[in-house]
């Protein structure tokens, strides 16, 4: 999920657009290559016909990305509509860009359905919430399975160096 999408307004392969060809896509996933370290170059403006870095070559080679180290190239940007409060400085308060990598349909069903400690809490009477709730434990007991914590005496007996400086 990306909350930072911006649209490229330049026509493809016209003017200086080739130097910012990374702007054609919101996201590109490629196989990691040591010679592909940046999607553009500070020298790109000097040769827009043959750009120093041609980002389209990163993904047009059609290499398989299965079982490979991957690079995710994400195009984030903000639109700014100027207003009088920009003077003397444009503030950045409230501006933020976010990208989340979340699985989508990774499991055939919600993994929490397999949780053995599931409980379901519901109102006894939805029309009268003050009447309380009912708790369905799906056969789970209320007992806890907790490893007993060792006492200080057991710790010291096992390892006296914890409190003594042994030379």
Image (spheres, rainbow, N blue to C red):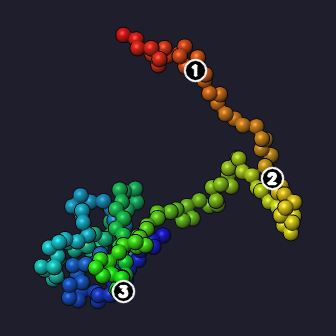
Q: Is residue 167 above or below residue 73?
A: above
Report the Cα–Cα distance between label 2 and label 3.
56 Å
Q: Residue at x 37, y 62 (%)?
A: 65
Q: Which residue is mark 1?
A: 152
Nearest the eye: 158 or 69? 158
Q: Which residue is mark 3?
A: 83
Q: Is residue 153 above or below residue 19?
A: above
Mark 3, residues whose alpha carbon is within 10 Å: few (<14), some, or many (≥20)? few
Counting labels gives: 3
Q: Is residue 107 above or below residue 167?
A: below
**Mark seen at residue 136:** 2
Report the Cα–Cα distance between label 1 and label 3.
65 Å
Residue 52 x/y as whole percent: 16, 73
Q: Is residue 139 above or below residue 146?
A: below
Element assignment for label 1? helix
- Mark 1 or mark 2: which is in front? 1
Q: Residue at x 22, y 81 (%)?
A: 18
- Mark 2 or mark 3: which is in front? 3
Residue 38 x/y as whole percent: 24, 66
Splitting the image into 4 quarters, where does residue 122 fall? Answer: bottom right
Residue 111 x/y as whole percent: 63, 55
Element assignment for label 2? strand
Splitting the image into 4 quarters, where does residue 87 fall? Answer: bottom left
Mark 2, residues whose alpha carbon is within 10 Å: few (<14), some, or many (≥20)? few
Residue 2 x/y as whole percent: 45, 71
Contact, CB < 8 Å: mark 1 with mark 3? Answer: no
Mark 1, residues whose alpha carbon is within 10 Å: few (<14), some, or many (≥20)? few
- Mark 1 or mark 3: which is in front? 3
Element assignment for label 3? loop
Counting residues from the N terminus, which is met first, the one under dot 1 or under dot 2?
2
Q: Residue at x 36, y 57 (%)?
A: 68
Counting residues from the N terminus, which is met first, the one under dot 2 or under dot 3?
3
């Amino acid at each position: 999920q990306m909350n930072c999408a911006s649209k490229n307004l330049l026509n493809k392969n016209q003017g200086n657009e080739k130097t910012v060809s990374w702007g054609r896509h919101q996201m590109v996933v490629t196989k990691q290559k040591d010679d592909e370290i940046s999607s553009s170059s500070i020298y790109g403006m000097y040769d827009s016909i043959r750009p120093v870095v041609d980002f389209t070559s990163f993904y047009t080679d059609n290499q398989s990305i299965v079982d490979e180290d991957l690079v995710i190239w994400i195009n984030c940007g903000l639109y700014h509509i100027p207003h009088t409060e920009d003077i003397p400085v444009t503030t950045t308060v409230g501006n933020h860009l976010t990208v989340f990598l979340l699985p989508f349909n990774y499991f055939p069903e919600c993994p929490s359905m397999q949780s053995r400690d599931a409980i379901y809490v519901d109102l006894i009477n939805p029309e009268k919430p003050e009447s309380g709730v009912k708790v369905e434990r799906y056969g789970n007991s209320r007992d806890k399975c907790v490893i007993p914590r060792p006492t200080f005496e057991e710790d010291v007996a096992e390892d006296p160096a914890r409190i003594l400086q042994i030379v």
